[in-house]
């Protein structure tokens, strides 16, 4: 059985035919003469015919070589067109891009990210999804979303993580508790009735870990697995206090509806990361997409539109 033809050998053959010299073809291809000679020999063996007459002055196509040259040039042109078409297709980005985020991040960043992505990939259908950490992680693992913006989870598992910024956690209280001041010592958390998610959520895990570290026990007034908006409304109504980054409550603090105190001794920090799943196929132009998202977040922080955030 004859060996199969391959495009590299055909490209080498075209170069030798154009230059009429093995040595000149080797220079153009950036290869040594022996490699070029082997490729031509392999092609002749596959076709079971001689393609060049060789002489001291170079090489001249045989009749079979002349016949092959037309086809080889067609193959080269087709491959070149294919490469250009693929590059053009990927440069347009994916047909659809789904980005999910936790509520505070979504509220702060989605508008700017959407504007930047639409300008960069006008042909891409962009869909934003908001959710709590556990559902977002499940969507990412299942391939229902492409990119997630999350407060960095304790267990990163099969995630590819790119940390974007960090925020200090604050104690959010009714305005009637403003006597607590701008800072609140973490060891006093046990004195405050708290409204937090149930134990399966990252914020609750962080709060429990912090309480154990400073030697206190959380005083749970109620559990709330709904949105931050619901939790903040419960705080406004005097049902207790909660823990949130300042960006989540900045508007309500400015309006005099809530009071916020930064946790100290120790300062408690959460990182916001852009994540993708290791076990899922990569969407086209993912690197460019992620750079666009990163720059959008950077612009938000630098403009002061993400209160309390620090770039990392």
Image (cartoon, rainbow, N blue to C red):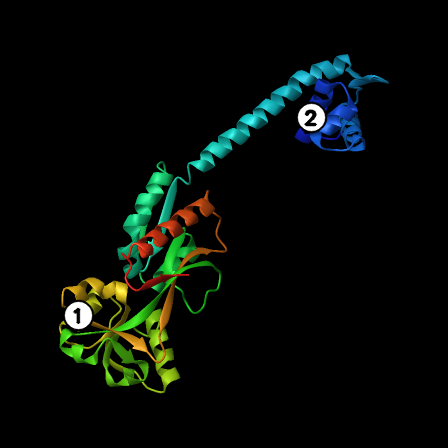
From the top left corner, tell me how far across and down residue 293 is, in percent.
38, 50
Horizontally, residue 28 falls left or right of residue 277, namely right
Whether residue 183 is visible to the viewer of this picture, yes or no, is yes
Whether residue 221 is visible to the viewer of this picture, yes or no, is no
From the top left corner, tell me how far across and down residue 121 is, in percent.
37, 39
Which mark is on residue 258? 1
Label 2 residue SS: helix
From this view, report whether residue 290 is shown above or below residue 95. Answer: below
From this view, report whether residue 258 is shown above or below residue 294. Answer: below
Q: Bin the neighbour count of mark 1 within 10 Å (Cα to Cα): few under 14, some 14-19, many 20 and up.
A: many
Cα separation between marks 1 and 2: 73 Å
From the top left corner, tell me how far across and down residue 311 is, in percent.
38, 60
Seen at 33% across and 69% down, the residue is: 168
Q: Bin the neighbour count of mark 2 within 10 Å (Cα to Cα): few under 14, some 14-19, many 20 and up.
A: many
Image quarter hosting the C terminus = bottom left
The quadrant in which residue 28 appears is: top right
Labels 1, 2: front one: 1
- Dots 1, 2 in contact, CB < 8 A: no
The quadrant in which residue 41 appears is: top right
Residue under label 2: 10
Which mark is on residue 101? none
From this view, report whether residue 270 is shown above or below residue 129. Answer: below
């Amino acid at each position: 059985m004859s060996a199969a033809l391959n495009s590299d050998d055909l490209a080498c053959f075209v170069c030798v035919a154009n230059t009429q010299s093995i040595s000149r073809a080797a220079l153009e291809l950036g290869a040594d003469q022996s490699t070029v000679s082997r490729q031509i020999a392999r092609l002749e063996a596959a076709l079971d015919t001689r393609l060049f007459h060789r002489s001291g002055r170079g090489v001249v196509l045989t009749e079979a070589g002349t016949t092959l040259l037309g086809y080889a040039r067609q193959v080269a042109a087709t491959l070149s067109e294919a490469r250009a078409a693929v590059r053009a297709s990927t440069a347009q980005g994916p047909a659809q891009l789904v980005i999910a985020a936790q509520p505070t991040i979504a509220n702060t960043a989605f508008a700017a990210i959407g504007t930047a992505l639409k300008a960069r990939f006008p042909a891409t259908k962009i869909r934003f999804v908001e959710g709590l950490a556990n559902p977002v992680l499940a969507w990412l693992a299942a391939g229902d979303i492409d990119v997630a913006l999350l407060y960095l989870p304790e267990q990163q598992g099969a995630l590819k993580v790119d940390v974007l910024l960090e925020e200090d956690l604050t104690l959010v209280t009714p305005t009637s508790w403003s006597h607590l001041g701008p800072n609140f010592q973490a060891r006093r958390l046990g004195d405050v009735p708290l409204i937090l998610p149930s134990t399966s959520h990252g914020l609750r895990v962080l709060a429990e870990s912090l309480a154990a570290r400073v030697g206190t026990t959380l005083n749970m007034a109620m559990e709330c697995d709904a949105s931050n908006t619901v939790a903040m409304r419960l705080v406004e109504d005097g049902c207790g206090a909660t823990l949130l980054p300042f960006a989540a409550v900045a508007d309500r603090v400015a309006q005099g509806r809530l009071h916020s105190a930064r946790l100290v001794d120790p300062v408690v920090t959460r990182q916001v990361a852009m994540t993708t799943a290791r076990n899922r196929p990569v969407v086209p132009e993912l690197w460019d997409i992620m750079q666009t998202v990163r720059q959008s977040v950077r612009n938000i922080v630098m403009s002061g539109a993400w209160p309390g955030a620090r770039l990392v």
